[in-house]
Each structure stands twice: as structure tokens, then as C-alpha cells.
Image: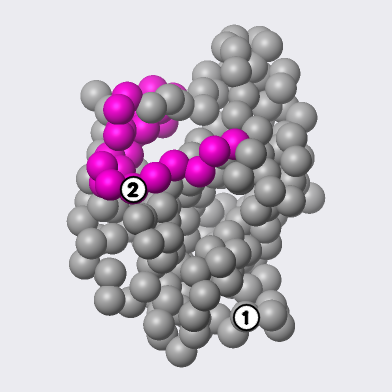
Amino acid sequence: MKQKKILLAVLVLVILTALSGCKKDDSNFTIGAWNENVFENAWLNMKFEIPEDWSLATDEEIAQLMNLGAEAIDLEGSGSDLLKKVSEIKNVYGFLAYSPDSTSNLQLVYENLSLTLGGSKYTEKEYIDSVVDLMLNNTAIEYTIEEQTTVQLAGKDFELLRLSLYDGAYYQDFYCHKVDNYMVNIIVSYMAENQADITDTVSKITTLK
């Protein structure tokens, strides 16, 4: 199985993200920033400790892989200037980190729900259900639902959808949690034999304070 094919398959989940919504109040939104190998976001009160031997995709790499151009480019600034930029972008990327062999990765994506068709219509569970519908109707890759439940990450309830592909050789865990006018999406993708390492990495997603 070629690594390039795997990586592109991993990223397709974000391309096909379903539409949802919540109340329109994003005045405190921040993308977050790196503190060595820990990504911190005060707005979420969350931090993500990434293994030290993992690499980070550049803005240009994300833009190329996702074919999203400016939507994948990191945003600079703060306050009203940042919010103006963000208000025009549907998917704002916190980061994409991947293992040395590129077969595991973790990405953080904020979906601006004011730009989605669903608006404030759906709950997190309905959002996940929409993702399920889209993925199962994807004719390019055959997905199998392994688990759909509610879990806690950093003291918050996340809806979890676990999918397998390539006959169980590969997994994608899709977590979503609604904050203000954004759906916070954490997507973790990995080979089946690396599940223990991924479980350890996810366990290090904790509160910032």
C-alpha cells in the first residue's frame, strides 16, 4: 500500500465533512499556536502533545493535498482582523502532524458553521450522522463503521466516529465538538498495528489550564 495513497485517503475525510451548525458567537475564536511539540488553544482550553519524532505539514503542503488554496493557509493576526479573515473561510486548519513513516497522522480542523448549508440546524451527533452518510456513499473507498459513541477529551464531550478501510488495515477516528460558531474536528488516522501508540497520543490531549 503506497504511503501517498494512504495519506490522500486519510485526508479525504475532511474534504467530505458534513454540514452542521450552532449559535453564532465566535468573538473569542483563536486558531492556537505551537509551544515546542505542544499545540495550545486558550479558546478551547485544550492542548495537544505531539510525539517529538512526528513532523508537521507546512501550510503549502496542506493546501496542495487538500486542493483548497487559501483556505489551508495559516492565518496571522488577532482580534477583529483575525475574525474577519476567519469569517470568510469554511475550514480553518490548526495543524496536521504525521508519524515518521507517514502512516499515522492527527489533524485539527475548525469548521466555520456560518458558511455551511446546515447553519445552526444540527447537533454534534447529527453532524456525525451526516459524515457517516457521506462516507458510506463514497464509491472511491469502502468504509466500515467500527464505533459511534460519545467520549471525553480534555473534559469535553466529543462525538466519536471510528471507521476502518482497506479491510481493517487502516482506521480513521473522527471526533467533533461544537464551540461557539465552530465545529471542532479532530481526525486521527493510523494503521491497525499502531492503535496502541495512537491511543497514547490521544490520551495526551488535555486541558490547557
**Quarter of image, res 91:** top right
Q: Nearer the viewer, residue 116 or 66?
A: 66
Which residue reaches farthest bottom?
167
Which corner quadrant of the image does residue 139 belong to?
bottom right
Residue underneath mark 2: 54
Residue type marked 2: Trp
Q: Is residue 128 magenta?
A: no
Residue at image x 67%, y 71%? 134
Q: Which mark is residue 181?
A: none
| Residue that carries the numbered disc 1 in the rendered image | 141
Which one is in front, 200 or 137? 200
Q: Residue at x 41, y 52 (%)?
A: 98
Please report the residue visible at 60 percent of the width from the left and 13 percent of the height from the top: 77
Classify 117 as above or below 31: below
Residue type highlighted by circle 1? Ile
Name the side, left or right, on which 154 lies relative to 20.
left
Tell me the distance, in whole angstroms, between the alpha carbons under discs 1 and 2. Answer: 26 Å
Q: Is residue 38 magenta?
A: yes
Local SS, label 2? loop
Query: How many numbered dots are placed on residues in this image?
Result: 2
Point out residue 177 in the picture as x, y percentages from the top left corner.
Answer: 47, 47
**Element marked by disc 1:** loop
- Horizontal and vertical percent for residue 96? 48, 46
**With 173 as the anchor, is 121 left or right in this view?**
right
Badge 2: how crowded within 10 Å, few (<14), some, or many (20+)?
some
Kindly identify the residue that appears in the image at 49 percent across and 40 percent down.
95
Query: What is the magenta range?
Result: 35-59
